Amino acid sequence: MPLKHPSRKTRRKIVIVGPAYPLRGGIAHYVSLLYRHLVKRHDVGVVTFSRQYPKLFFPGTSQEERESDAGAAIPTERLIDSLNPFSWISAARGIVRTHPDLVIFTYWLPAFGPCFGTMAALIRRGSGAKILFVCHNVLPHERRPGDLVFTRYAFRHADFFIPLSHAVARDLTLLRPGAPHTVVPLPVYESFGRTLAKSSARKSLGIKQTRVLLFFGIVRQYKGLTTLLSALPQILQTMNVHLFVVGEFYEDQSMYRKQIDTLRLAEHVTVVPEYVPRTRVAQYFSACDVVVLPYWSATQSAIIQIAYQFNKPVIATDVGGISEVVRDGITGLVVPARDAGSLANAVVRFYAKKMEPRLTRMIKKEKQRYSWGAMVRAIEALLRA
């Protein structure tokens, strides 16, 4: 259902707090897209970090986009230093001076709980604005001391929540029973350009193989790349495939390189160990046949929503909220986690039964459920509540 343009009287002042361009990553892309859709109907500002992670604890090469990308830029104020509580107070006071109706905190990591909790309390006290937390995660995949305390502190002054999957909603209600919330699935990430012809995308990347699998995104242990590599020998007994591993490693690559060598997979695996700028994402997704997410744990994944933007089927594990979005036999295939045999069988079945055309047709219909309009309507409904 199309959104009606609101009258001047119904336009609200909204402030989004979270990572945003030039900071990089999936959540920064989310904030950019949320801003672009909300600003069509409301007066929207974005407050982001001057320093997001301390360099000492950041495992990647850079926290900011390396390439200038005007298409991703949105107006922001870089007011928050994650290590400086005085900046939290100053940022909150700056937000209060704008007289917001709603402040949206983008939440994904308990490390930011003290910062966001302090800001939410000051904003609520100083302006009477409603406080919404959009929860990518409630608790992280890799637990640390203080996660529960920091998250409870962050959520103390929230009026309502939008968990991005039912798995996240379950974590929310365990941590804060009775928390007012509306589940809205993560919308399709539509900011990476148009789908390219598979042949031209492969030519641009120098891909000559016929069957191409894609593992995309930051590499961490819970993403299950070791399981996918373990599945490859079984797949190769039946058919020739090539796996592209594309993403920055947030841990030592040597373990994966050793596994590739031990299993004699060097000619079947291409590793591109770098963060891919927004302008190059389309090449990799357009070039592959299917995206593989062999995660050991998850809540939801923006990689699925990028895949759907490019109408690519997904083979994924049944963890967290993944199977809420990857519908087995409809938009992809779902297998048990940490089961290399089942994963190998799914890949073989995908090719042997020539499933790509049918799954692609279904994705084109299914992805309409994951619209930004649904997210905007949910936010507006909470404002009216």
Image: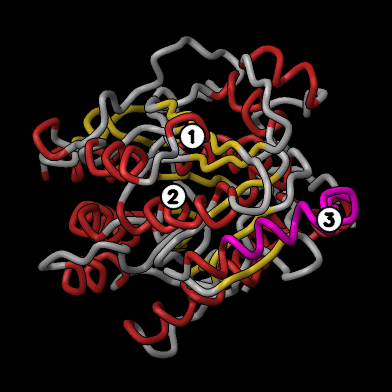
**Quadrant that contains the N terminus:** bottom right
- Badge 1 crowding class, 10 Å Cα cut-off, few under 14, some 14 to 19, many 20 or more, is some
The amino acid type, in three-letter code, at marker 1 is Val
Q: Nearer the viewer, mark 2 or mark 3?
A: 2
Disc 3, SS: loop
Q: Is the residue 331 above or below the residue 289 in the image? A: below
Instruction: Say if residue 120 shows up in the picture.
Output: yes
**Sooner in the amino-acid sequence: mark 1 or mark 2:** 2
- Please indicate whether residue 290 sits to the left or right of residue 293 in the image: right
CA separation in Å, label 1 and label 3: 23 Å
User: Which structural element holds mark 2?
Assistant: helix
| Position of 383 relative to 309 (above/below) | below
Lateral position of residue 191 relative to residue 152, left or right: right
For the residues labelled 1 and 2, the Cα–Cα distance comes to 9 Å
Task: Give the side of residue 136 with respect to residue 156, left or right.
Answer: right
Circle nearer the viewer, 1 or 3 = 1
Residue under the image location 36 percent in, 32 percent down? 248
Residue that extends furthest to the front in the rendered view of this protein:
237
Residue at screen point 61% across, 56% down: 186
Q: Residues within 10 Å of mark 3 (few under 14, many from 20)?
A: some
Q: Quadrant of residue 376?
A: bottom right
Q: x and y percent of residue 185 in the render? A: 63, 63
Question: Magenta-highlighted stretch: main secondary structure?
Answer: helix
Q: Are marks 1 and 2 in contact (CB under 8 Å)?
A: yes
Residues packed near mark 2 inside 10 Å, few (<14), some (14 to 19) or many (20 plus)? many
Q: CA distance from mark 2 to mark 3?
A: 22 Å
Q: Which mark is residue 269?
A: 1
Q: Secondary structure at mark 1?
A: strand
For the residue pair 93 and 209, the one nearer the viewer reads as 209
Tell me the residue that label 2 is attached to. Answer: 229
Quickly name the residue at label 3.
355
Tag 1 near tag 3, CB within 8 Å: no
